[in-house]
Amino acid sequence: MTEQSIALDPSAVATSDASVGDYFALLKPRVMSLVVFTGFTGLYLAPGVLHPVLALTAVLCIALGAGAAGAINMWYDRDIDALMARTRMRPVADGRIEPGVALGFGVSLAAASVALMGLAVNPMAAALLLLTILFYVFIYTMWLKRRTPQNIVIGGAAGALPPVVGWAAVTGDVSIFALVLFAIIFIWTPPHFWALSLYRAGDYDKAGVPMLPVVSGARITKRHMLAYTLLLFPVALAPALLGFTSAFYGVCAALLSASFLAAAILASAAANFLSILADMSVRFSASPASSFLRMTFRWVRASILALAVRRS
């Protein structure tokens, strides 16, 4: 290709300037590392034995599938990525990789990861991996992200599926424990991502992405974070409570959940938290349970006074 033809074709310049590091960045490696960790967790905890080579293949397929979804996401979101400080240096938004090349790269990786999972491991794991990719691309990226502040709540299902994929790679099916693993990540995702959204609310507003802090403000967002963190506490303990894991896991989960809850409470404005407690107090004081407790307290106090008079 001549210099003149490159000058007339900006996409050719973008592709020729791309490095191996740019293609690696296209896979969203930080997100991929979390997906690999949770996928391996499901694989490790699943009952049964999987040959080490097949286990490594399953983890590789999960990683490639996650990377494929990330590449397609960067292709589709290149317009809004270019507007936000956090994402404007991504390879497609910055022009280092041409959009069509990124799309082809992502689709090829997705097809290869699903095919390899199906041929080398089992069809159930391949089907779940395909579902994860399609959900992230079509449901979250193309449908929910730009339309509703609940985008990360519903779309978080894609990020919660990898441990189920890892579980199915060993067992060939999906059990209650695999669904518990799904639930932990599904409920953890919103408060985690809303914390980032609070920090980058200006970026999302500029790009027109209706994240919860942009639509409802920081006060409402922090209330939602607190609610999901409270819900996460018992869900995180569920593996131990259901007898799937040891008591050691239960203790660790309780400590970590308490730390997460404490952070959520601190993140909430003191006035907001107190107003919630006040509202709960008003509702409780008007309930039959409150009347019963007041009557019980009065009876106990009268009994103690009567006993004291008799002894004197």
Image (cartoon, rainbow, N blue to C red):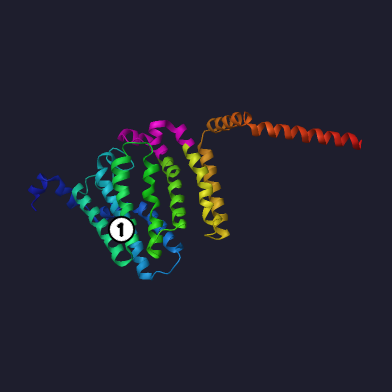
Residue at 38% x, 55% y is 162
Q: Is residue 285 visible?
A: yes
Where is mark 1, residue-wise? Answer: 64
Residue 258 falls within the magenta-colored stretch:
no
Depth check, front residue: 259 or 181: 181
Residue 174 position, x and y percent, is 41, 58
Quadrant in the picture for the C terminus: top right
The x, y position of residue 216, in whole percent, is 41, 31
Q: Which residues are magenta?
A: 197-223
* Closer to us: 175 or 262: 175
Name the one closer to the observer, 48 or 24: 48
Res 93 visible: no
Identify the residue at horizontal 51%, vertical 41% (top origin). 264
Q: Which picture quadrant has residue 193?
A: top left
* SS at badge 1: helix
Residue 21 spot, x, y in % from top left: 27, 55
From this view, report whether residue 286 is shown above or below residue 95.
above
Asked whether, in this view, residue 266 is left or right of residue 217, the answer is right
Q: Is residue 199 magenta?
A: yes
Main secondary-structure element of the magenta-colored stretch: helix
The amino acid type found where label 1 is placed reads: Leu
Q: Is residue 43 left or right of residue 87?
A: right
- Residue neighbourhood size for the residue with mark 1, other residues' Cα within 10 Å, grouped as few (<14), some (14–19), many (≥20): many
Q: Residue 155, relative to residue 279: is it above or below?
A: below
Q: Position of residue 32 (x, y in %)?
A: 35, 54
Identify the residue at horizontal 35%, vertical 70% (top origin).
Answer: 53
Residue at (56% x, 55% y) in the render:
241
Which picture quadrant has residue 168? bottom left
User: Tag count in the figure?
Assistant: 1
